[in-house]
Image (cartoon, rainbow, N blue to C red):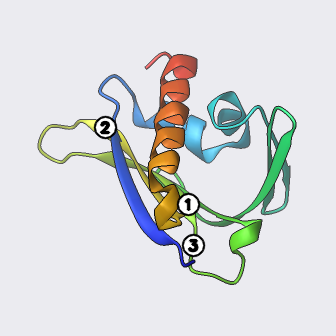
Amino acid sequence: MKKEKLTIEYPLENASESLLWRMVGKPLGLALWFADGVTVNGNEYTFNWDDHEQTAFLIEQKEGVYTRFQWEEDKDTDAFFQIEIVTQDLSGHIGLLITDYVKPTEKEDLILIWDSQIDNLKRKSGI
């Protein structure tokens, strides 16, 4: 079953761009909220959760703006996941824009996972 693109925006009113970048663009930041642990070997990131481990490849990064990964299982496909810092021009409000790919039957589950991850980010960063 082909995966579909999913985009979710999370407003983070009390966040600063520099704090968010440390949390989404750096391995130590990702280890604070996205996974229990992160090991980096070049562009290969191994994320650990309890007794589960998953590998992703850093395929693109724009300093201070976004980080894009591709899970090892999605290699040779168009699927990726991206965490992007967005700022509204008029209001100056900051948020995260999540882009991910999901099988249609798993969409609701993936949204719940991202909701949980972003709640964890807020708690760990004090946002």
Q: Compare marks 2 and 1 and give the one earlier in the sequence.
A: 1
x then y, percent, for residue 117: 55, 34
Q: Nearer the viewer, residue 107 or 18?
A: 107
Mark 3 lies on residue: 79
- Compared with 127, 3 (above or below) is below
In 3D space, how far apart are the residues under numbered discs 1 and 3 (Cα atoms)?
A: 7 Å
**Tag 1, which secondary structure?**
strand
- Compared with 32, 82 (above or below) is below
Residue 5 visible in the current orientation = yes
**Closer to the observer: label 3 or label 2?**
3
Q: Amino acid at mark 3?
A: Ala
Q: Amino acid at mark 2?
A: Ile
Q: Amino acid at mark 1?
A: Phe
**Tag 3, which secondary structure?**
loop
User: Extreme bottom residue here?
Assistant: 76
Going by the image, does 51 lie left or right of 125? Answer: right
**Tag 2, which secondary structure?**
strand
Q: At 76% from the left edge and 31% from the top edge, which residue is drawn?
A: 36
Q: At 57% from the left edge and 77% from the top edge, which residue is drawn?
A: 1
Q: Could you tell me which quadrant the C terminus lies in?
A: top left
Q: At 52% from the left edge and 63% from the top edge, which residue is drawn?
A: 102
x then y, percent, for residue 49: 78, 36
Going by the image, does 32 lie left or right of 10? Answer: right
Label 2 Cα neighbours within 10 Å, binned few <14 / some 14-19 / many ≥20 = many
Q: Are marks 1 and 3 in contact (CB under 8 Å)?
A: no
x then y, percent, for residue 104: 46, 65
User: Extreme left residue here?
Assistant: 90
Mark 1 lies on residue: 81
Q: Nearer the viewer, residue 102 or 79?
A: 102
Residue 94: numbered disc: 2
